[in-house]
């Protein structure tokens, strides 16, 4: 699997380490940290133990992020599709669950018979991800793990924990769940909050797997419990009614003035969007996540303008007319991919010249065919529809 890894440059690593973690207490109060506090305080009011907060570095070992949690080294998750590797054995953590195994082992060692221990691990995480109003590459998460007697490991207790979390975070919003297996849980479920008729995934959870306890040297005859991981950004968005995840970090004064509390969002004018379809020749099989990351890197300081990127189609050379192959500059063993890239800045209108320049940078960065080839669809008419 090491052949598929692509390592971060020093500049990219330093940029990732410099991003503010909105859950940290030394920073200005932010809706993301406030929703985290709401959850922890709500759990305490509901009778769960006071949380033991776990914190850790952003750069972790592959063993912490994957191995101890039961991931098979051959799984695609360990490749470059989702993971930002620092070197052969370390990466920017993809999940706050990476902080749990050692804390879980210590909790089991210190727990007295009949006692409950609640571990909470909040923080920023790093992924290669798709780009739309619910997704970003540096989401904030929080793991909640409750360790107790083996009898705690039941669907009844799990659903009670979920209900108490969502009652604190998004009161009065209905939620649904479905089966979703995980490496380190048994009876795993995915939980979605219903928002204006649409289901928004906010957390996954399950019973702590016996295999995980055994891997950590914890006796499953003496200990059991619940494991839950939630997306703090989405919970904050749902609580306040924020329409776009980029707004959580938008520097506009009118936006940031609303990020210091959990009161309902007052809409800041949604400026017109600009959309263009970009057609490029690329290595076959590149995932949407990899394409998105390349696009964001090419955009540089303008990456915040990119509201959404969608893969609209893929074609191999045999499916294309010769004229299109020549115009595109498609080389043997490449594929043609059509991307729709939507631009919208939350604070000001993007000029046509600025949009053209950014689209050209994105196309140049993604196109792997003959130099100077490739074509673009015409710029679409700006739209003010969110």
Image (cartoon, rainbow, N blue to C red):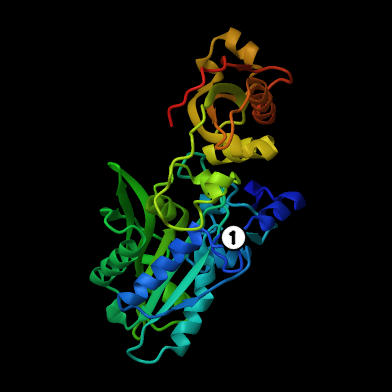
Nearest the eye: 332 or 246: 246
Regarding residue 71, the answer to whether it shows in the image is no
Neighbor class of circle 1 (other Cα within 10 Å; few <14, some 14-19, many 20+) is some
Query: Which residue of the protein is positioned furthest toward the bottom in this rendering?
Result: 112
Q: Which residue is denoted by mark 1 in the rendering?
A: 21
Left or right, residue 178 beside residue 273 = left
Q: Label 1, secondary structure: give it.
A: loop
Q: How far across and how far down the image is residue 308, in percent?
A: 51, 34
Looking at the picture, does residue 257 appear above or below residue 365?
A: below
Q: How far across and how far down the image is residue 269, in percent?
A: 49, 35
At x 48% / y 39%, what residue is drawn?
268
Q: How far across and how far down the image is residue 283, in percent?
A: 61, 31
Looking at the picture, does residue 68 appear above or below residue 306?
A: below
Left or right, residue 183 beside residue 302 = left
Nearest the eye: 80 or 273: 273
Res. 375 image quadrant = top right
Quadrant, the C terminus: top left
At x 65% / y 49%, what residue is drawn?
5
């Amino acid at each position: 699997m090491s052949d598929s890894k692509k390592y971060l440059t020093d500049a990219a690593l330093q940029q990732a380490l410099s991003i503010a973690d909105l859950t940290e207490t030394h920073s200005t109060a932010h809706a993301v940290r406030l929703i985290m506090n709401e959850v922890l305080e709500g759990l305490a009011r509901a009778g769960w133990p006071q949380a033991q907060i776990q914190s850790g570095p952003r750069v972790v070992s592959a063993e912490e992020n994957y191995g101890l949690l039961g991931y098979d080294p051959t799984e695609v998750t360990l490749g470059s599709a989702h993971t930002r590797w620092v070197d052969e054995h370390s990466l920017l953590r993809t999940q706050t669950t990476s902080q749990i195994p050692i804390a879980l082992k210590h909790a089991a060692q210190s727990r007295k018979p009949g006692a409950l221990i609640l571990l909470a691990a909040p923080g920023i995480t790093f992924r290669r991800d798709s780009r739309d109003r619910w997704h970003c590459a540096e989401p904030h998460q929080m793991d909640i793990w409750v360790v107790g007697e083996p009898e705690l490991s039941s669907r009844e207790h799990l659903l009670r924990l979920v209900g108490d979390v969502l009652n604190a975070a998004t009161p009065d919003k209905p939620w649904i769940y479905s089966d979703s297996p995980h490496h380190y849980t048994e009876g795993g479920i995915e939980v979605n909050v219903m928002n204006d008729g649409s289901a928004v995934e906010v957390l996954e959870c399950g019973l702590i797997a016996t295999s995980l306890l055994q891997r950590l040297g914890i006796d499953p005859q003496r200990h059991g419990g619940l494991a839950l991981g939630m997306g703090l950004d989405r919970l904050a968005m749902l609580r306040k009614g924020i329409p776009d995840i980029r707004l959580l970090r938008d520097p506009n004064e009118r936006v940031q003035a609303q990020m210091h509390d959990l009161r309902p969002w007052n809409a800041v004018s949604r400026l017109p969007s600009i959309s263009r379809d970009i057609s490029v020749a690329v290595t076959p099989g590149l995932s949407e996540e990899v394409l998105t990351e390349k696009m964001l890197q090419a955009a540089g300081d303008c990456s915040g303008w990119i509201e959404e990127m969608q893969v609209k189609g893929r074609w191999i050379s045999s499916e294309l007319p010769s004229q299109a192959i020549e115009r595109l500059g498609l080389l043997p063993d490449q594929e043609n991919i059509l991307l729709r890239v939507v631009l919208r800045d939350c604070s000001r209108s993007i000029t046509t010249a600025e949009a053209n320049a950014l689209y050209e940078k994105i196309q140049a960065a993604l196109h792997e065919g003959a130099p100077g080839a490739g074509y673009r669809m015409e710029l679409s008419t700006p739209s003010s529809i969110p």
